Amino acid sequence: MSDMRYKLHPVSAFINFMKSLKELIIPFIVIFGVNIFRDGGVGAMFSQGWTGLLPLLIGLVVVLFSLVVGIIKWKRFVYWFEDGELRIEYGLFIKKKRYIPFERIQSLNYTEGIFHRPLNLVKVRVETAGSGKAGEAEAELTAIKRVDADRIETEIENAKHRAIPVMGPLEVQHEQVDENAVPEKKELKTLYRMSMKELLILATTSGGIGVVISAVAVFLSQFSDLIPYETIYEEVILFLRFGYLIVALAVFAGLLIAWIISVILTLLANYQFTIQVDKDHIYITRGLLEKKKVSVPFKRIQGVKVSRNPLRELFGYGVVTVESAGGSMGGKDEKIRLFPLVKNDRMLPVLEELFPEMEFQPELVKAPKRSVHFYYRLDFLWMLPLIGVLSYYFFPYGLLSLLIVPPVIAIGVWQHRTTGYALIGRQLTMEFRGFSKHTFYVWKKRVQAVNVLQTYFQRRRDLASIEATIKSGMLGYSARINYMEKEDASRILDWYHPAPVTAKQKGQPE
């Protein structure tokens, strides 16, 4: 194996510089914002000699320092392959080394940003079974050529090809293979490509408007000390004099703009969403301005979840999430969406080809009829006091609060009719609903724990809640079905617990 040292592309120095500037945006806006609102504005900075220009000089020094740091980081970063490991050496003031054995590498995720694509470069995130914090890669190569990224994959495949594990009766042996042998090139099969119709439906129903509004609120909160609230309050009072219709139209216009922004962001993020597969991995590619490619090893997949909100359920659409023990869609601990939005008739054939051993349309055992009131009676603990207070202090209009009771009961009945489970061989299927409907499919070998929960009132009615937990991300994922028959809970426990080993199976006399 070659120990030749490789460096990142020089554009990585500029990318590191831009990352530093991104972190300095808020301080710069605050500094120059203070000068804008002071007497004389920005012009006063130039009329006070060098002392007035001090904030500008400090900012310039910080920018130049960030540029130098970015260049040094690029110069100090090298990687190479040695002894079956990807080795990385980096560090600004203190030299650090990281050795990653090839057998620990689960996947290589690629990202092509606006600085990568013109130069045919990629950013590579190295995902391992024990990657650090939530969503944090084991290593990240900021910018390398596509051929260099292919070289890393080739080195990993060659290492796995040279030492093939063969299980012996007592220990693991290694069959040595010709080192010059080249592994077969993986052929990718395209299983799904999102149509423009599905992309538009996803963008218009994604609910990203809340993200846009919260992002604006967080941004404005950074400048709360500089915002003239009294002036804004006076302007709002003056604006309210135009009447409720004008105010309503203004609010509608603001929400419409936020919705349009969320639609554009969703279109850019999921453009040309494609699913490809080989014998070991699922590859998900998406994005227009920033193209991302995520590889998901089959052996790391713990379960599959299909979610449908009421509107999408009505029109036969769903969202499919893969619960994986490692890897994410981006720098955050983001769940891997196998389908961000898909029609049921297109979803099932792909899932059946990806997971042929799994049944995606099992017949479910539903929650018993006598448990229906458990789904809504706890809501009366907050409804009744609220209705009582409103009815007493705002009589008779407060009695209109009674109208909240039928929808709450209807939602509880809706949740009851959705809840169910199925046991087919070594597969557990659980279906439940908050407001959206979720169907969870998991193999027995992937289940970490099964818990049966019973309250005093459930024990009186021979009911129980069942919770199954799998390893997913840092905290795991738990699916829960409530108020099932006690016998159903026992059946799932018996299915999960290994069968007791008899004396005959141990080879001992009974």
Image (cartoon, rainbow, N blue to C red):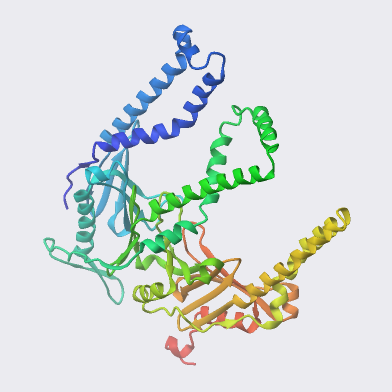
The residue located at (21%, 54%) in the rendering is 150
In the visual, does 46 lie left or right of 466? Answer: left
Give above or below for 288 relative to 201: above
Left-right relation of 117 to 503: left
Looking at the picture, tell me which residue is in the foreground, 263 or 132. 263
| Front residue of 148 and 299 | 148
Q: Kindly give the residue lying farthest to the left in the view shown.
A: 180
Q: Position of residue 135 (x, y in %)?
A: 43, 51
Q: Dividing the picture into quarters, in which one does residue 433 lie? A: bottom right
Instruction: Name which residue lies at 38% across and 79% down.
Output: 357
Q: Position of residue 454 (x, y in %)?
A: 69, 73
For residue 186, side relative to residue 490 (left or right): left
Quadrant in which residue 390 is drawn: bottom right
- Relative to 149, is 445 above or below? below
Residue depicted at x 49% and y 92%:
510
Q: Position of residue 300 (x, y in %)?
A: 38, 65
**Can residue 135 be seen here?**
no
Above or below residue 486? Residue 150 is above
User: Can residue 449 be seen in this snapshot?
Assistant: yes
Q: Is residue 225 above or below residue 102?
A: above
Q: Give the farthest residue toward the bottom.
A: 510
Residue found 36% across the figure and 50% down from its top:
138
Is residue 417 toward the left or the right of residue 473 in the image?
right
Total numbered badges shown on the rendered structure: 0
Q: Position of residue 127 (x, y in %)?
A: 35, 54
Give whichever of 291, 356 is nearer the camera. Answer: 291
